[in-house]
Image (cartoon, grey):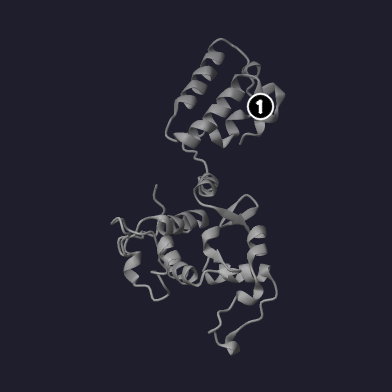
Amino acid sequence: MLADLSDQHVNNRLYGLLLALRYTLLSVSPDDKQILEIVSFVVEKCRELSLDLRDAGFPEKWEDNPIWDEKFSLDKSPMLAGSLLDWVETGSAAIVRRLLSVDKFYSADFPVEKRKQIKSPRQMLKSYRDYGVVIFFPLGDTTYYPNFQFVDGAVHPVVAEINQAMRHKCQETDQVRMAASMTQWWLAPNHALPEQGDGRALTPLSAVTQGTLTKDFDSSIFDAYQGVYGTR
């Protein structure tokens, strides 16, 4: 999409500027069509005046670039994933694996006869994902996990139970939006939880930390959970 900018004949001419501006506006104001109108104007005037578009940096078959289609839109998942990294402390899969202890995968009261052998932190983390007990999201080739989920070498048992229940309620199909939706719930004040001393509602994460939100949680804590990501 932006590959044309690697061409020296393009990046220092009008077309390169218009291409960069089009991409920027798609990121911040996707309904803005000003750059498309400018491109149409430039193309029309060049034809009227018998000018060569290549002199303005327009490459061969530039129209084939989907970015010039007025219906084109950017994939918002990478941008949302990036905002998640700014919003909540996270660790990559490689970092999280270093925090995990295989002997902590099962709680002490889990029946021994039902336990499967977990040989490595890598297998442990994959099992967490398969069971739906952790929030995670991809960005590029890396998978990230919000740090608040992990304590003492394993996923926090209460967080695991709630994540699994919440995942079943989630209406998102995109993994990044699902992660954003679930993270948003954890960090937002929840009026189904006990109030703080100043009368403000606790966030679920604060309630878990304080010990007032346990595995025996009431389903009313999900009343404010829409299962879709909304702006915070």
The vertical placement of 110 against 74, above or below, is below
| Residue 223 spot, x, y in % from top left | 31, 64
Give left or right: position of 137 versus 182: right
| Residue 6 spot, x, y in % from top left | 69, 30
The vertical placement of 10 against 199, above or below, is above
Residue 151, picture quadrant: bottom right
Give left or right: position of 115 versus 27: right
| Residue 12 spot, x, y in % from top left | 66, 20
Q: How many marks?
A: 1
Give left or right: position of 62 versus 208: right
Label 1 sits on a secondary structure element that is loop
Q: Residue at x 53, y 12 (%)?
A: 48
| Residue 202 spot, x, y in % from top left | 36, 59
Q: Nearer the viewer, residue 10 or 83?
A: 83
Q: Nearer the viewer, residue 48 or 35?
A: 35
Q: Residue at x 66, y 23 (%)?
A: 10
The vertical placement of 77 against 57, above or below, is below
State the residue lying farthest toward the top: 49
Residue 32, picture quadrant: top left
State the residue lying farthest toward the bottom: 113
Q: Residue at x 70, y 75 (%)?
A: 119
Q: Nearer the viewer, residue 132 or 102?
A: 102
Q: Nearer the viewer, residue 212 or 69?
A: 212
Q: Residue at x 67, y 67 (%)?
A: 122
Q: Quadrant of the N terminus?
A: top right
State the residue lying farthest toward the front: 197
- Check disc 1 and give the amino acid type: Glu
Residue marked by disc 1: 60
Circle 1 crowding by C-alpha within 10 Å: few under 14, some 14–19, many from 20 = few
